[in-house]
Amino acid sequence: MKNVITLIVVLLLFAACQEDTSTKTTSEQATKEAKKMPEVPVFDRDSAFEYVKIQTEFGPRVPNTAAHQQAKNWLVNQLKSFGAEVIEQNFKVTAYTKEVLNATNIIGQYNAKAKNRIILAAHWDSRHTADHDPDEANHKAPVMGADDGASGVGVLLEIARQLQLHPIDLGVDIILFDVEDYGDGGDDGDYTTWCLGSQHWSRNPHVPGYTAKYGILLDMVGAKGARFTKEEISMRFAPKLMNDVWKLAEAMGYGNYFVNTTTRQYVDDHFFVNQIAKIPMGVIINRPPDTETLFVKHWHTIEDTIDKIDLRTLRAVGQVLLAAIYREDAGLL
């Protein structure tokens, strides 16, 4: 009988130890997970808006103009002031008009030696012709490009500022592509006349043999009530990235901006990065459902001006992007 009692006591003690160990393991795991959750900086929408505004104050950033050169110098200096290692990738390219354009892709590197890298991109030029303006008299006028170009750049400049204030280990390359918007607006279906800067970079990256885990492109991310859908090319080449970012946006309360709907493809800089550089890249782009072009009404018109930029939209895009970056750094995206 004594031996039976002793055995029962031993078994009870063993079970208790197992329970303590299990509880301890669960507790340790929870603590580890809590430590991994990154602290995401607050995106300053007023700061981003100011960066958009300054770009428009140079005038239309059309290649081979003084405004284009002035804007380039300012963008380079801004990225340097935010602690980035900046590379100016100068090149010449012949447009569909047969004009030779002087262009520059601007690359701001953070943690240049880190092997784990992502790309954040936008185009910094603006269109040379307002070919979708309802008034044909304006078709030869250049576009200011507050939304179409400057909004994405403004968001990325604010992200660059936050990366300086709140350093991470992740390698981040902010790439501002040039000559995205100098394409032929005709119906010949030749997409290669567009996105000349990203085509050049994809064939000649700023670092030989360069690669990245993925890229996120911003285009037209500043209008009031923007509707960012899952664009078809992005879903073909970077479905996991797109789904992860949209789920994150929903969890953060920005589901009214990041709509869980797939829309038809749009050839933008991400198309050539995917096709040529073989780096998965998705685009965050406004695709309203109630316009003939499926773009905002001020797209490629003289009305693409600073008054079209909405602080809340800038904040939604910038905060989601910051959360994605810092989660990626923590290994959680």
Image (tube, helix red, strand yellow):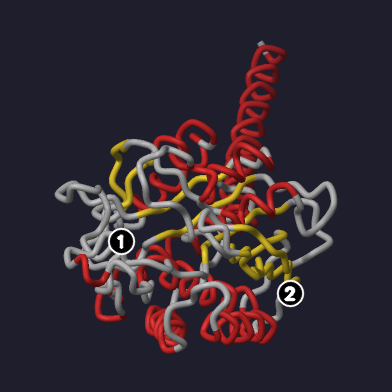
User: Residue placed farthest to the left in the image?
Assistant: 290
Mark 1 residue crowding within 10 angstroms, few (<14) / some (14–19) / many (20+): many
| Gap in angstroms between the C-alphas marked 2 and 1 | 34 Å
Residue 279, position in %: x, y?
65, 42
Q: Secondary structure at mark 1?
A: loop
Residue beneath the point at 70% across and 59% down: 170
Q: Secondary structure at mark 2?
A: strand
Front residue of this view, candidates 214 and 176: 176
Mark 1 residue type: Asp
Residue 6, position in %: x, y?
70, 20
Residue 131: image tag: 1
| In the image, residue 7 above or below residue 326 | above
Using residue 136 as the reference point, say whether residue 299 is left or right of it: right
**Nearest-to-viewer mark from 2 and 1:** 1
Residue beneath the point at 39% across and 46% down: 246
User: Residue placed farthest to the front in the image?
Assistant: 98
